[in-house]
Amino acid sequence: MKTHTQEPIKKMSKIQLITFDLDDTFWDIKSTIINAEMNSRKWSEDRIGEKIEWGTFENFMQIRNELVKEDPSLEYDLGMLRKKIIAHHTKKFFKNTKDLNKFIEDAYNFFLEERHKVTFYDDVVEVLEELSSKYKLGVLTNGNADVNKLKIGHLFDFSISSMDVKSNKPGKSHFAKARELSKVAFKDTLHVGDHQVNDVLGARDLGINTIWFNLNNVKWEADNNPPLQFNKWTRFEDLVEENYGS
Ligand SMILES: [Mg+2]
């Protein structure tokens, strides 16, 4: 994480803190997860030495929903959810829980490594580097990506996941925790993300400024009040300056 040792830099805008969503804001999540999933399945089959019946996507969603119904904390504890899904598919291959648990731990760690093999959208890292010298930066994610595993951790003052606050955006907890850690008021904070509800409405409802990352130029459908938006990271700083600069 970044440390502030130098004198405060004179702000050009009233925004002091910018918080960012991760998945589908800094990189594409679907291709990342599909790759991670494919490689993890292969890893599991190699390790066990058997073909495993993984089922269809519908089966997966059904298992997932049943697990969450049994234990609602799995809604935000994606690590435990994944471990339970791994167990669901592989427990019949193990004679004792110790071996099964060791396998689950290893399989989960393998998945997590793979899940961090992301391809940043164009210019994201360069833009974050620029922003980090002008603003406090934070991460607010519902997922389990960790910026410290992606060589960009030093650009951020803090990172908050759903596990940290035991809930998901658009709930208030991520945003409230960001305010607590940064000591920056909601009105001087800007939140940026791809999700109309989880990011934009969640933040806006608290009086946080919002900019919507709308990569594919989809229609704003969440309400009658479309937010500021951009689809290229090279546009972002100008957008902030134009709208919040003094
Ligand atoms: Mg997202």
Image: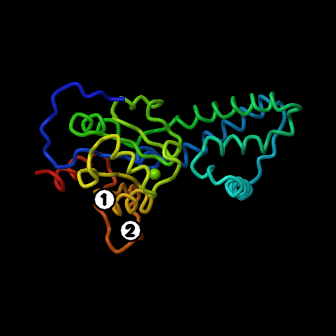
Q: Is residue 1 left or right of residue 246?
A: right
The residue closer to the viewer here, 167 or 212, is: 167
The residue identified by callout 2 is 220
Q: Is residue 234 left or right of residue 105?
A: left
**What is the basis of the colouring in this image?**
rainbow
Kindly identify the residue that appears in the image at 81 percent across and 41 percent down.
52
How many other residues sit within 10 Å of disc 1, few (<14), some (14-19) or many (≥20)?
many
The residue furthest bottom is 224
Q: CA distance from mark 1 to mark 2?
A: 10 Å
Image mark for residue 177: none
Check disc 2 and report its element: helix, strand or loop. loop
Question: Which quadrant holds residue 152?
Answer: top left
Please provide percent x and percent y for residue 206: 34, 60
Give the total of numbered labels: 2
- Check the image and report above or below for 207 versus 113: below
Kindly identify the residue that appears in the image at 77 percent across and 51 percent down.
55
Kindly identify the residue that appears in the image at 33 percent across and 47 percent down.
179
- Check the image and report above or below for 117 versus 66: above
Please provide percent x and percent y for residue 151: 42, 28
Q: Amino acid at mark 2?
A: Trp
Q: Amino acid at mark 1?
A: Gln
- Check the image and report above or below for 177 versus 204: above
Check disc 1 and report its element: helix, strand or loop. strand
The residue identified by callout 1 is 229
Mark 2 and mark 1 in contact (Cβ < 8 Å)?
yes
- Check the image and report above or below for 61 versus 149: below
On the rendered image, what quadrant is the N terminus found in? top left
How many other residues sit within 10 Å of disc 2, few (<14), some (14-19) or many (≥20)?
some
The residue closer to the viewer here, 164 or 193, is: 164
